[in-house]
Amino acid sequence: MRLSAYFMPTLKENPAEAQIVSHRLMLRSGMIRQQAAGIYAWLPLGYRVLRKIEQIVREEQDAAGAQEILMPTVQPAELWQRSGRYDDYGKEMLRFKDRHEREMLFGPTAEEMVTDICREIRSYRDLPKILYNIQWKFRDEVRPRFGVMRGREFLMKDAYSFDLDKDGARRSYEAMFRAYMRTYARLGMTAIPVKADTGPIGGDMSHEFHILAETGESAIFFDQELEEKSRAGELTVDSMNQYYAAAEEKHDADKCPVPAERLRTMRGIEVGHIFYFGTKYSEPMGAVVQGPNGETIAAEMGSYGIGVSRLVGAIIEASHDERGIIWPEAVAPFKLGLINLKSGDAACDSACEDIYRTLSEQGVEVLYDDRNERAGVKFADMDLIGLPWQLVIGPKGLAAGVVELKNRKSGEKQEVSLEAALARLTA
Ligand code: 5CA
């Protein structure tokens, strides 16, 4: 992509309405624009990141045996009247009527709808099943804030498991738990699982997953060894039970089993939440199958959420510096920012065009800054948008046969031959 043609409306000043760094940086780098409180349009740069996160989430759900579906955003109230949640849900639910005066709502989650769909499953032989979708949700939060971190409209991956019995449900829960650990590891993040209350979703087993960042909304206490295991992406529900992790409300310093030198206290951003809730929905809504002896069995269910749009903000909270975003390579909107220090100079232009073509042909995503701007502006914009690598092409370097390759995260700059830089970028 050529920056001269790209729609990336950056801002020089910090927007006054943004209280936290991810919100500021997303607005300043032209990733999103607010359309109403807690409702955002995703511009090209932001949408690329959102899609990359979505794709990693999707691949790990598929690998865990879940099947992707797409349910509508608009749901009939009738479904929620059947589960009994329609009245309980309160003002967070956006309700409206269609032209026939039928009560409708914009889905805040989809337990009811997916349970209704799975009434199609008739025999015990057709279980287990895990279905998921990645779809926009709406919750009319009292205080939407922090940009996409607490939006009203937000993108969620929500999966739902259907099993014949508790053992099966436990296996599905375990498969999702592992998929979550692998997903966060692939995103370049360390997520700490914490046992949680089930809240309005209901049920009797639940974990939240927190990305560590100073601006997190909840304080969590955990064994440092848990963090090490999480980073490897290898934790399971059982192995997790060996390590201590608790949210602030649950932590009791006097009863804490972790030795002081291993206890870590940090703030976390909740980027996922999973629940096992048995037959809470399947029973009232009739998601039942016929068992081997003709008996009727209500499906044992769980639901599994990942905040896909929240993750964009959470990753920035966990990975930035005073100059801007530092994207982990797996979710970066482009891998490389190609900076032409002297657009209009024949040697610089032709070298950059060559590099741009060569790398693009090899599948490297390049954002080429071909604008007629001062070098300082180009450096500042590249640091702001946080691509993992920058390749700087200037007339002096070209004359000496070298280019500058900069790593955004470490800040390390290397003067190398063009061939060496290209080899590094395509490795
Ligand atoms: N039905 C269950 C699991 S599918 C459920 O809705 N769980 S949840 O309420 O915990 O939401 C799942 C994830 O969505 C949360 O962990 C969080 O990362 C994200 N999320 C929830 N509310 C918002 C919001 N207002 N803005 C952005 N992300 C949100």
Image (spheres, helix red, strand yellow):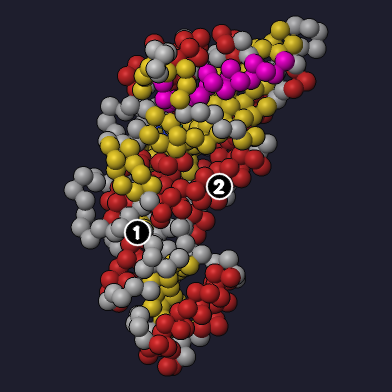
**In this rendering, would 14 be left or right of 311?**
left
110 part of magenta stretch: yes
- For label 1, the residue is 8
Instruction: Please tell me which of labels 1 and 2 falls first in the chain.
Output: 1
**As drawn, 389 above or below 308:** below
- The stretch in magenta equals 105-122
Question: Residue 221: in sight, yes or no?
Answer: no
Q: Residue at x 55, y 47 (%)?
A: 55
Q: Residue at x 33, y 62 (%)?
A: 384
Identity of the amino acid at label 1?
Met
**In this rendering, would 355 be left or right of 138?**
right
Q: Which mark is residue 55?
A: 2
Q: Quadrant of ligand 1?
A: top left
Question: Which SS class for mark 1?
Answer: loop
Q: Residues within 10 Å of mark 2 (few under 14, many from 20)?
A: some
Q: Residues within 10 Å of mark 1 (few under 14, many from 20)?
A: some
**As drawn, 390 above or below 124:** below
Q: Position of residue 142 (x, y in %)?
A: 28, 27
Q: Position of residue 242 (x, y in %)?
A: 56, 35
Image depth: mark 1 or mark 2 in front: 1
389 part of magenta stretch: no
Q: Position of residue 9 (x, y in %)?
A: 30, 58
Q: Residue at x 76, y 12 (%)?
A: 291
Question: Residue 132: in sight, yes or no?
Answer: yes
Identity of the amino acid at label 2?
Gln
**In this rendering, would 117 be left or right of 356?**
right
**As drawn, 368 above or below 154:** below
**As drawn, 142 above or below 316:** above
